[in-house]
Amino acid sequence: MLSSLINKYKNIDLKTEIISGFTSFFAISYIMIVNPMILSDAGIPIELSVFATIFISIIGCLLMFFWADAPIILTPGMGVNAFFTYTLVVGLDFNWKTAISVSIVSSFIYIIIAFTSLSDILAKAIPDTLKLGITVGIGLFLVELGLEKLGLVVAGDNGTLLSMGSITNPTTILGIFGLLLTLVLFIKNIPGNFIIGIGVTTFVAILFQIKGQKTNISINNIMEYPSIFAKFDFSHLLDLKFLLAVFSMTMILVFESMGLLEGILPNKNKFKKSFQVSAVSSLLSGIFGTSPTVAAAESASGIESGGKTGIVALVSAILFAISTFMVGLLSYVPQSAIAPVIIITGALMMQQMRFIKMEDFSEWFPAFLIIALIPLTGSIASGISFGFISYPIVKVANNEAKTVKPIMWALGILFLINLISNTLLV
């Protein structure tokens, strides 16, 4: 096996691949902190969720190396973790174990799609404008979430939806400092900009004794990790609310992963296997006790550094493994240090808006509904539903009914049923 690997990569610039692996890892390393903090709002203990995040990232990257040989990093997805927490748990009132079960069933369906011709059918049938709209809408939702965690935006009063927070609050001041610092580092393309921003902001918080959310993360907690491993609750499996949640999460996993992979893979021939690995890793995520993995958009940083093969993913897997022994440092990180990363990540996802054909209103309006309604309703599923429902309608109105594939009509009807049912159930 070793000799075959050597022959496989003998014409590859190994140094460039390794450097690209380091670049991708440091670009996405913040997920080890951010994902557990988001999932903590769902009731999963931060000190245990951090291990689930690291372990599934290691496995996802190793699968990407061995099966797809693609420079893609798989980690629990930003946006998907928000759906898991704020739609399934907070919105639909599931406990986190039931939400994990929703992820398991959704991922199983995702695997069926990925390993059959359904993936090719969907890739061709679903308009790019809707795929892009989902990415942008989730991005705007993350921006809103980050601003709230920063304390810059708070729940509205006097009839307003949102209001300006107090900029004299020490945690808000700290967050604004962290945002400006991280933004400068990012724009200057400093390697590891996000993790540096988190580190410096955390240091300032300790220096000035600005207290935030207290965590108790330690390598010793790994002994308690089995308490969230393979913990499912399928008692609501046949409930309509559960089935609708499965439908929504499946749509998010399939279309977000499809859009991300199509957008960043340097070799499009590796799409199929990368999509399959993403599906398998997503299923394993639930077993490990975290929200589903997706292809990290930050993989683009390693690709831009010259990474072309799965060695990038292998290097990242090794670095994630090493990070397991340094999790104790995460206990000092306040939420104000995390919020800037969430905001900038959301802004990066929103850049996909430039690929939407805004000059064609029949293309733009369905995407616009997705983008606007995801953050305004606080539901990724609702935003997607309105986009898919409206797309066939506006195309008919624009005398382009023939351009709408039959599967889009079917999905539009399913999303309409999903939307009405969710309204009645919530």
Image (cartoon, rainbow, N blue to C red):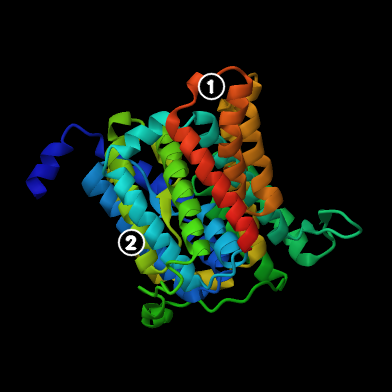
Residue 303 shows in this picture? yes
Above or below: residue 261 compared with residue 160: above
Q: Which amino acid does the dot numbered 2 rest on?
A: Leu
Above or below: residue 123 compared with residue 19: above
Q: Earlier in the sequence, mark 2 or mark 1?
A: 2
Q: Secondary structure at mark 2?
A: helix
> Whole-percent x and y of residue 365?
65, 30
Image quadrant assignment for residue 308: top left
- Disc assigned to residue 150: none
Q: Is residue 271 left or right of residue 165?
A: left
Q: Secondary structure at mark 1?
A: helix
Q: Which amino acid does the dot numbered 1 rest on?
A: Ala
Outermost residue toward the right in this view: 158
Image quadrant assignment for residue 148: bottom right
Q: Is residue 1 left or right of residue 25?
A: left
- Disc assigned to residue 284: 2
- Badge 1 is on which residue? 401
Q: Residue at x 55, y 57 (%)?
A: 83
> Whole-percent x and y of residue 6?
13, 42
